[in-house]
Image (tube, coloured by chain):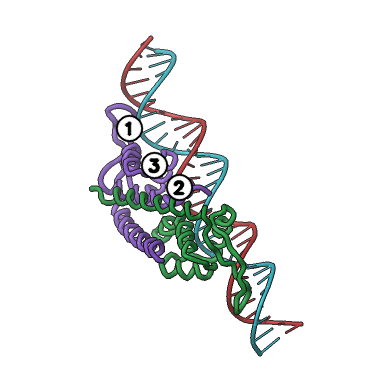
Chain colours: A purple, B green, C cyan, D red
Amino acid sequence: MNASNTQIQMRKGLLEFCILHIISRGEVYASDMIDELTEAQMIVVEGTLYPLLNRLKKSGLATYKWIESESGPPRKYYTITEEGKSFLATLDQTWESLVHSIQFITTKH
Amino acid sequence: MNASNTQIQMRKGLLEFCILHIISRGEVYASDMIDELTEAQMIVVEGTLYPLLNRLKKSGLATYKWIESESGPPRKYYTITEEGKSFLATLDQTWESLVHSIQFITTKH
DNA sequence: AAATGCTACCTTGCATTACCAGTTTCTGGG
DNA sequence: CCCAGAAACTGGTAATGCAAGGTAGCATTT
C-alpha cells in the first residue's frame, strides 16, 4: 500500500466520467482525449482508453465514425449520443454528491 | 453499464481515504465507522470494511486495541499511526489535485 | 520498390478493488 | 444450557486500470 497505488485507485471510475465530458464537446479521437486528459493531469495510457471507448460504444453512450487523416491511418472520431448525454447528467450529480460526502467527512473534527 | 454501477466505481478507492480520516479523529470501531459513512451518504457494508481495516493494520497505517463492551463481545478500537498521518496528508493532496483535474475537464467548453 | 519508422487501433493477462452472502466467535439473558 | 444478538471475519464474483504486446495503414528514405 503506497501513495501512487492509492492515487490510481482514487481515479478509478472517474475516467469514464471524464471521457464522456470530453466527447460531449465535439468530435475527438483517442490521441485528442489523451492530450486533454494529460493536460488535466489525469494520465491515461492507450491500453486503458481503448477498452473504455469500446464499452461506451457497446453501451450506446457514444458512437464514432471513421475519418480519413491527411497523414497516417484513418481515425475513429467519437461523439456522444443522446443517451450518453442524459447518462452524463446523472454522472454529474453523482460527482457532486461524492464531493459533498468527502467534504463532510474530511472537514469534521 | 448503468448509473448505479458507475456510482459504485466512482466511490471505489475513496473509502480508504475516508476511513483514515475517520480514525484520525479518535478511537472508533467498525460500527462507528459505518454510522459515520452512512451519515455522509457513503454506504458501506461490513464485508467491505473489515478487509480494508486489516489492510490498514498490516500496512502500519492504523492500529487497534481490544476494549471490553458493556453489552456484547469486545470491540476493536482503531486509531491512526504516525505513519498513517503522513500518508493521510498525501492522500489529502491527491484528493485536491483530483478535484482540480475533474473541474478542469468538466468546466471546459 | 523495398525497408524503416510513425501513427492509430486493438487484445491479453495481471493485480487490485469493493461487493455480496454467508460463517465464526463471543457475550449475556431467559 | 440454549438462543439471540453483536462483532469480526471469509471465499467467490465482477469490474477496473495497467503493462505489454500485436496488427495494420501511411509516409519517408534509400
- In the drawing, does residue A90 fall left or right of residue D13? left
Tell me which amino acid carries mark 3: Ile
Q: Nearer the viewer, residue A99 or B25?
A: B25
Q: Nearer the viewer, mark 2 or mark 1?
A: 2
Q: CA distance from mark 1 to mark 3?
A: 24 Å
- On the question of residue A64 being in view, the answer is no
Q: CA distance from mark 2 to mark 3?
A: 10 Å
Q: Mark 3 = which residue?
A: A43
Tell me which amino acid carries mark 2: Ile
- Residue shown at 57% from the left, 52% from the top: B59
Q: How many marks?
A: 3
Q: Give the secondary structure at mark 2.
A: helix
- Residue shown at 48% from the left, 55% from the top: B85
What chain does badge 2 belong to? A
x, y percent for residue C22: 63, 67
| N-terminal-most mark, 2 or 3 | 2
Residue A8 numbered tag: 2
Residue A74 numbered tag: 1
What chain does badge 3 belong to? A
What chain does badge 1 belong to? A
- Residue shown at 37% from the left, 47% from the top: A57
- In the drawing, does residue A89 fall left or right of residue B58? left
| N-terminal-most mark, 2 or 1 | 2
Check chain identity for marks 1 and 3: say if they share one: yes
Residue A16, relative to residue C3: is it above or below?
below
Q: CA distance from mark 2 to mark 1?
A: 32 Å
Tell me which amino acid carries mark 1: Pro
